[in-house]
Image (cartoon, grey):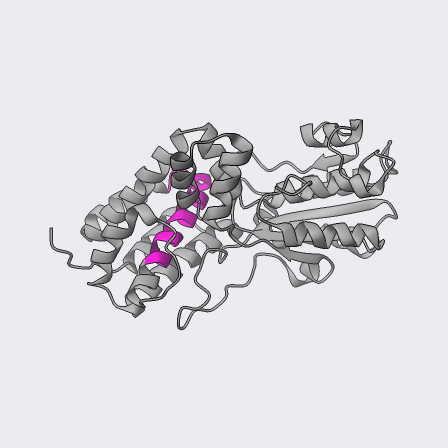
Amino acid sequence: MNPWGVIGHDWAVEHLRKSMEFRRVRHAYLILGAESVGKETLARAFAMALNCEDPDPARHPCGVCAACTRIARGTHPDVMYAQHDATTGALKIEEIRAITGKLALKPFEARYRIAIFRDFDLARPQAQDALLKTLEEPGPASLLFLLARSTDANLPSTASGMTQTPEAILPTISSRAQVIRLRPVPAGEIARALVEEFKAGEEQASLIAGASSGRVGWAIRALQEPDLLAQRETALDMLERIVAGPLTERFKESDGLAKDRLALYPLLSLWQTWWRDLLLLVERADTPLTNLDRAAHLRVVALHCSTEQVYEALNATRTTLHTLMTTNAQARLALDVMLLQYPRPRVPN
């Protein structure tokens, strides 16, 4: 682990460290990546480094001064977090306006006054527009960190015919911020961190790292909350049951899933990794699989699917996730359309 406490994104840490060293800190950063890949950890560490009270700049963030410890705990008055609607998960325009109003004030005690917007991809276009004035006329001591999930973060970039879905961020926003894309962290690096930093057993660390899809935050939580692994098993079991079952069973599952819209985001992200693995197997790619514990079943299914079928299912999952995250589309209808595009391979029992 580097001195910033960020696992697996050394290049991003070095980039931000040099921006401080050469006094080229931007007023806004858009950090993109999969759910729990480390976006907030990086933003928080950068906020600590910018406001660290250690007299030696080379030691920023020191992690022990009053500013660092309060930022780490989330209690520093100059580091604000926007709150999402508890029901819909959306980042509302009223909240953005409230945060930008506070951001315009001078720092109480720190060098910089910082606003962190988690899951900015859940902000509607009108809400994003509320940031434009702040982005165009930033205060001399204010910074914005926009954290957004990238729906294509776990897709195989070398698969034939694969295209990129635009991010759910307006061009007027992304063009006014420095974009930092965090990619999934290699399983070996995550496993090593779990053993060295969190005292996990090697076998346990390897299992969790392999199931994490490169998401450091998820791996750490899974080590501390074993139920996460059980939830993952249940979600993948459901997908395999859906693929093997008739349309009537698919729609029954859809009805139940649609009742909890917020739970669909991590679920569909996980399902993307399953279809990704299947696509890699169908195309006989050398890229390592994400869901290694499902490899045997995936290899059997791959024998009964074409590249076009798997790609269509992967793209349907990805599109549905993007639609649910960025629009008010009915979850049940979106899921039904997605499931209709899933193949029905005739796998022998």
Residue 84: x, y in percent? 60, 38
**Could you say which quadrant of the image residue 119 lies in?**
top right
Camera-side residue of 45 and 57: 57
Q: Residue at x 39, y 29 (%)?
A: 227
Q: Residue furthest bottom?
A: 161
Q: Residue at x 53, y 35 (%)?
A: 196
Camera-side residue of 98 and 120: 120
The reply to whether residue 88 is visible in this rendering is: no
Residue 28: x, y in percent? 75, 52
Q: Residue furthest left?
A: 349
Q: Residue at x 58, y 36 (%)?
A: 85
125 vs 111, left or right, is left
Q: Quadrant of the N terminus?
A: top right
Residue 32: x, y in percent? 60, 53
323 vs 308, left or right, is right
The answer to whether residue 189 is above or below residue 303 is: above
66 vs 225, left or right, is right
**Could you say which quadrant of the image residue 211 lies in?**
top left
| 262 in magenta | yes
**Could you say which quadrant of the image residue 284 lies in?**
bottom left
Q: Magenta stretch mostly in which secondary structure? A: helix
The answer to whether residue 72 is above or below residue 190 is: above
109 vs 11, left or right, is right
Camera-side residue of 248 and 15: 15
Q: Which residues are magenta?
A: 258-277
Residue 165: x, y in percent? 50, 63
Camera-side residue of 224 and 160: 224
The reply to whether residue 82 is visible in this rendering is: yes
